[in-house]
Amino acid sequence: MKNTADKNVSSENIKEMGTPIIPDINSKIHFLTVIGQIEGHMILPPHNKTTKYEHVIPQLVAIEENPKIEGLILILNTVGGDVEAGLAIAEMISTMSKPTVSLVLGGGHSIGVPLSVSADYSFIAPSATMTIHPIRITGMVLGISQTYDYLNKMQGRVIDFITRHSNISEEKLTELMTKPGELANDVGTVLIGQEAVEAGLIDEVGGLTQALKRLKGMKNTLED
């Protein structure tokens, strides 16, 4: 009976996590992953890899309330997604009392940029990229001035959040967003690894080891 149960657990682990065994560790650090497309109020097609904001927000509340958890590492590999949902998650992370560190792996594109800078300290892998571009709207759009005003206000919210939580200026960020020629049939900028640090968006180039070391140092500082 036990062998059957073990096989079922192993099969579920392979299906969900890609590994037959998940290490059982007692850690005071919580790892939260944001992958694929950030899903907001509209349900995305089933073939899309998504991170649902209604799943992430309760996790953040639980992390903040759990006395056993002393820090959060946010791992990102996202193409972006719903602006409202992404900003909601970013605002919650930025207001947590526990130390937070973000790590961009693969990509932190579009609304993934505010998420990347929402932590107390941010890292980006040398090969990871960040695409910075203006807000887009899909579906039917009314060609009236109010539509432009709405987009402008939404864009302002994103720019304000990024500049408040990173070292990039509003002028530099706007320049990167509206830069022509780098994206086919579009405007914007792609930053790779060190370029994101030089632009002032990300604090440091690094990986998991560096992120863990930084978070543990922040924990020790708070304890002192």
Image (cartoon, rainbow, N blue to C red):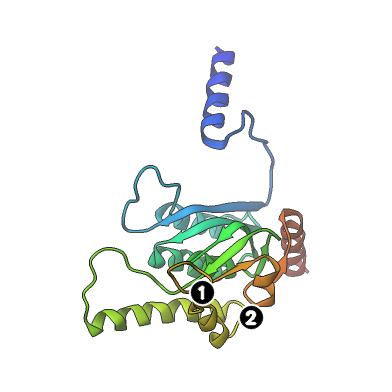
Percent x, y of residue 16: 52, 35
Q: Is residue 205 visible?
A: yes
Q: Residue furthest top?
A: 1
For mark 2, does the 10 Å Cα neighbourhood hold few (<14), some (14 to 19), or many (20 or more) residues? some
**Image marks 2 and 1: residues in contact by CB distance under 8 Å:** no
Residue at left offset 65%, top offset 77%: 199
Quarter occupied by the C terminus: bottom right
At horizontal 60% and vertical 62% (from top left) the residue drawn is: 129
- Across and down, in percent, residue 37 comes to 45, 54
Give the vertical position of 196 relative to 2 (above or below): below
Amino acid type assigned to the residue bearing label 2 in the image: Asn
Residue at point 32%, 51% (across, down): 43
**Residue 97 - label:** none
Q: Is residue 19 left or right of residue 52?
A: right
Quarter of the figure that contains the N terminus: top right
Q: Which element type, helix, strand or loop, lies under badge 2?
A: loop
Rendered location of residue 46, percent (x, y): 36, 43
**Camera-side residue: 213 or 61?**
213
Q: Nearer the viewer, residue 98 or 67?
A: 98
Does 82 sit left or right of 27 as displayed? left
Give the residue at mark 2: 167
Mark 1 element type:
loop
Residue 136 pos. (x, y %): 37, 69
Residue drawn at (55%, 70%) of the image? 94
* Neighbour tally class for label 1: few under 14, some 14-19, many 20 plus, Cα within 10 Å: few
- Residue behind mark 1: 181
> With 161 as the anchor, is 71 left or right in this view?
right
Which one is in front, 215 or 51?
Answer: 51
